Amino acid sequence: MLAGLTAALALVGPCAGAAQAKFFGGMVPDVPSAGAVSAGAPVAIGAHAPARSGPIARIANLPYSGGAVLHSNRTHLIFWQPPVLGFDPGFGPQVETFLARVAADSRRPTNVYGLSGQYRDSAGPAAYNSSYAGAVLDTDPLPSNDCTEPSYFAGGPGWSVCLSDHQLENEIARVIAERGLPRGANDVYFLVTPNGLGSCVQPGSGSSCALGGSSNGGYCGYHSQDGSILYAVIPYSAVPGHCQSDNPRPNASTADPVISMISHEHNEMVTDPSGDAWIDSAGNEDGDLCLTVFGPNIGGSGAGAWNETIDGGHYYLQEEFSNEDASCRPRDESDRISFSAPRNPRARKRLTLSARASDPDGAIVAYYWSFGDGRSHSRSRRASHAFRRPGVYRVVLRTTDRVGNWAFYTRRIRVRG
């Protein structure tokens, strides 16, 4: 979180019928790329500064405050493109593809989203269980300015348009109502704004604004809700010197820095949607603790390097905080699983398959067997099954660990007559 601007910023809910405290979370401060830390080094908690020496003490772990997490989520994109502004070529498809890939890789520990399941409520983990519902191109004209985007700092974007959170949330609500979009408890909306559209949290303000500079409470994104809409505001951030936009761009797109912000806000909306679940006394959520921490590159080089592979796509994303490891991590540790089977099994004779599985950070809580003959069995570590006909069958064991992630083990079994 920004120093001096905590996540639990109390304002009047703009779409509410009566005054209420409004939560602003994941207020990503406007940190230049020079502040990035690589190779999984630790970061000073709450300061978003380059790493200090030594590991993060376990006392720095995120505490649980009793609130709800999202056990699944359905993502929606709203691209606001008023007549006077626009997105760069290919920008929208890159962002859409990212969220579709995040959904396709659900339940797997192979990317940073797989860490979210270690944060839970009484009903279970904030599982990596996402679906993508699509995008809307919103061409509404701009309302009158309701704030002043700072332009006095060196290298500022010089945007003349400035809307308050009140106006942005009203626009999200209008699009949802006009298009008949869902407002379920697990629906997550991202409002993505183009180059030139500035914003500030409060009406009439010239501080706490998009790309407002680190000394002026500037932000690169935030998430909030009005009680019925869970949303994140994602400003255009491919502006040199701001929002770590000079980090590698593996897709050679101005969407790359925006995708990094979406990843940050998405993970925090899942683990702390209302600001009363996994958040510390300084207002930090799991993404905030690792804002400037990036793991080692796993492919590419230079400006095209990437540190995450999601459903085959390459991305450069910050790490997320892991309470289990008391540090920032790029992904969850994979479970180790296998199974044994009798030698020379015969058709119509019942055989027993025995799973061996372990979770480095917890426990295996469920088993699911697929026998390759159209039948399946779940829940048991040991499965008893009879194949009706001779042949070669592809048997798959899927395990679920305590955080809701899956692991798979496949083996071909030849069944004799």
Image (cartoon, helix red, strand yellow):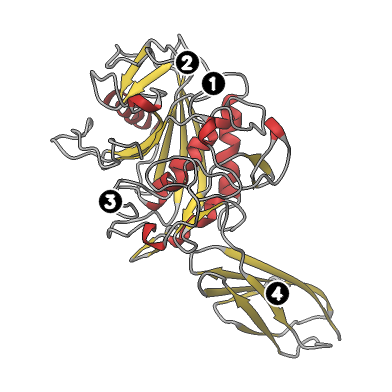
Q: Which residue is mark 1?
A: 240
Q: Are marks 1 and 2 in contact (CB under 8 Å)?
A: yes
**Residue at the (39%, 46%) spot, across then down:** 269
**Pointer 2: what residue?**
155
**Which badge, 3 or 1, comes first in the chain's sequence?**
1
Q: Is residue 318 above or below residue 155?
A: below
- Residue picked out by circle 3: 281
CA gap, disc 2 to disc 4? Answer: 61 Å
- Where residue 141 sits: x, y (%)? 38, 13
Q: Residue at x 82, y 88 (%)?
A: 343
The spot of residue 326 in percent (x, y) is 46, 60
Q: Tell me which corner region of the image, top left, top right, bottom left or bottom right, holds residue 300.
A: top right
Residue type pointed to by label 2: Gly
Sequence order check, earlier mark of 4 and 1: 1
Q: How would you rate the neighbour count of disc 2 (Cα within 10 Å): few for under 14, some for 14-19, many for 20 or more?
A: few
Q: How far apart are labels 1 and 2 at the CA level?
A: 8 Å
- Is disc 4 in contact with disc 1, using a CB cutoff of under 8 Å? no
Picture coordinates of residue 344 (x, y %)?
A: 84, 88
User: Which comes before the other along the chain, label 4 or label 3?
Assistant: 3
- Which amino acid does the dot numbered 3 rest on? Ser
Residue 216 in sight here = yes
Q: Which numbered tag is attached to residue 371?
A: 4
109 to the left or right of 56:
right
Question: Are the residues at dot 3 and dot 1 in contact (C-beta closer than 8 Å)?
Answer: no
SS under mark 4: loop
